Amino acid sequence: MNVLMISPGYPADMPEFTRGLAECGARVIGVGDSPAGGLPDLVKRSLDEYIEVRSLWDSAHVIGALRERLRGRSLERIECLWEPGIMLAAELREALGVEGLTIGEAHRFRDKEAMKQALDAAGIRTPKHVATDSIAGCWDAANEIGFPVIIKPIAGAGSADTYRVNDADELRAVLPRLRHVPTVSVEEFVDGEEYTFDTITIDGRIAYYNVAWYRPRPLIARNNEWISPQVIALRDVDDPSLAGGIEMGRQVIDALGFGTGFTHMEWYRKADGEVVFGEIGARPPGAHHVDQMKFACDFDVFRAWASAVTGGWLEQKIERRYNVATIYKRAKGVGRITRIEGADELQKRFGEHVCWNTLLPPGTPRRDWKKTLVSDGFIMLRHPDLAETLKMADAVGSELNLFAE
Ligand SMILES: Nc1ncnc2c1ncn2[C@@H]1O[C@H](COP(=O)(O)OP(=O)(O)O)[C@@H](O)[C@H]1O
Ligand SMILES: [Mg+2]
């Protein structure tokens, strides 16, 4: 079977997904706008063919290039696991007559207003929401919904341009900063814990899922540099406190008519137990959450996705063995990393539980912590017991320190 993989080399996880497809026996054709010579080796090995286009963001051009290169050869699937390419994939499917998410369906995964309207119609609890493209509209929405509210782009990512607004003064201060965002969503602020519900779904049936817990909530993590944000892939998904979110996840996938592939949903649980929808993407989560899934169950999650896409089944038996914590570190200071404190001591205490360490070595320039979810690197560790996992994660958060100058 011929599978077209959009942007097979970028971002970080794409080479592994591309490998998965090849290992499952697909003939993988890559399309991207980066030069073939610069593709990661794993991608070069996994692709049968690479179609280099001038720009991935000119869909008419991409469609033309594909028609010319394919010359009547059929494609069975068109895959994109990268948020900015979700609409492109849908456009290519419609132009080339390939099954999978249509433009209308994909739109409901991209446009947070269309998404919530579809879910409201299905009776799913979303935050109160109003989409608007004017300042007056923001004021009306805030007054109607009641402070505090969240204001965010209807097609954002990574908490960019997202603000919690507690009162009229704050709204006045925030509005000028949103001038470059064409349409915003004003939402009821939902206070609570925040989780993911990630799936590999096959023909609308959830074949595998993962629940991860954000500590703290992404918006707080993004606005406070001193925090070492944690994401915990939870082993005990049968914990009653997660049942409402998992059930909501099933309903959301149903309501949006998702067929086959990866999904990444976020949901909130309020102190009173009420579960509220956050958002959903028709793709896996980023920031190496997919690797967390791999370490939680010791399985090849990339290949599992590929086997779902190419064969309509999961070839591996999946058993949840560990909680996996990722702790993203941000150096203190600006410039280059000069030293890392606490690493030896922590290594002695629980090095055996660490599965991955990507901390930037001394001498490397710091990353822009607002722009990257992986910060200046992370520690990923795992343990069968959740309390132990959290204890180790908190120790990495507070006792491991990177310095830069
Ligand atoms: N209605 C809301 N109530 C409370 N917090 C919210 C709300 N909407 C967004 N947030 C916070 O902002 C973060 C980013 O918003 P989200 O809708 O997930 O967009 P993104 O695509 O940027 O991840 C969320 O993870 C959450 O912490
Ligand atoms: Mg989000």
Image (cartoon, rainbow, N blue to C red):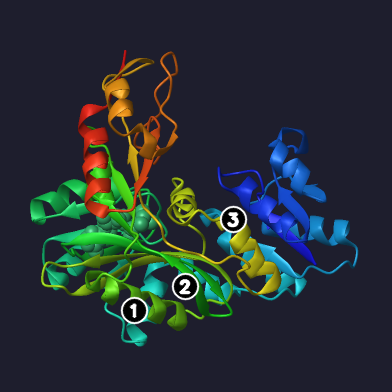
Residue at 37 percent across and 40 percent down: it is 353
Quarter of the image where ligand 2 sits: bottom left
- Measured in 3D between alpha carbons, the distance from the residue under mark 3 to the one under mark 2, in whole angstroms, is 25 Å
Q: Residue 133 appears at what percent x and percent y? A: 34, 62
Q: Residue 247 appears at what percent x and percent y? A: 34, 79
Label 1 neighbourhood size at 10 Å, few (<14), some (14-19), many (20+)?
few
Residue 279 located left or right of residue 342: right
Above/below status of 177 relative to 368: below
Q: Nearer the viewer, mark 1 or mark 2?
A: 1
- Measured in 3D between alpha carbons, the distance from the residue under mark 1 to the one under mark 2, in whole angstroms, is 20 Å
Q: Amino acid at mark 3?
A: Phe
Q: Amino acid at mark 1?
A: Glu
Nearest to N terminus: mark 3 or mark 2: 2
The residue that disc 2 covers is 108
Nearest to N terminus: mark 3 or mark 1: 1
- Measured in 3D between alpha carbons, the distance from the residue under mark 3 to the one under mark 1, in whole angstroms, is 25 Å
On the question of residue 119 being in view, the answer is yes
Residue at 70 percent across and 41 percent down: it is 42
Nearest to N terminus: mark 1 or mark 2: 2
Above/below status of 170 relative to 184: above
The residue that disc 3 covers is 302
Q: Amino acid at mark 2?
A: Arg
Residue 385 located left or right of residue 336: left
> For the view shown, which residue lies furthest in the right direction?
71
The residue that disc 1 covers is 247
Label 3 neighbourhood size at 10 Å, few (<14), some (14-19), many (20+)?
many
Element class at badge 2: helix
Quadrant of residue 386 in the image?
bottom left
Residue 351 located left or right of residue 206: left
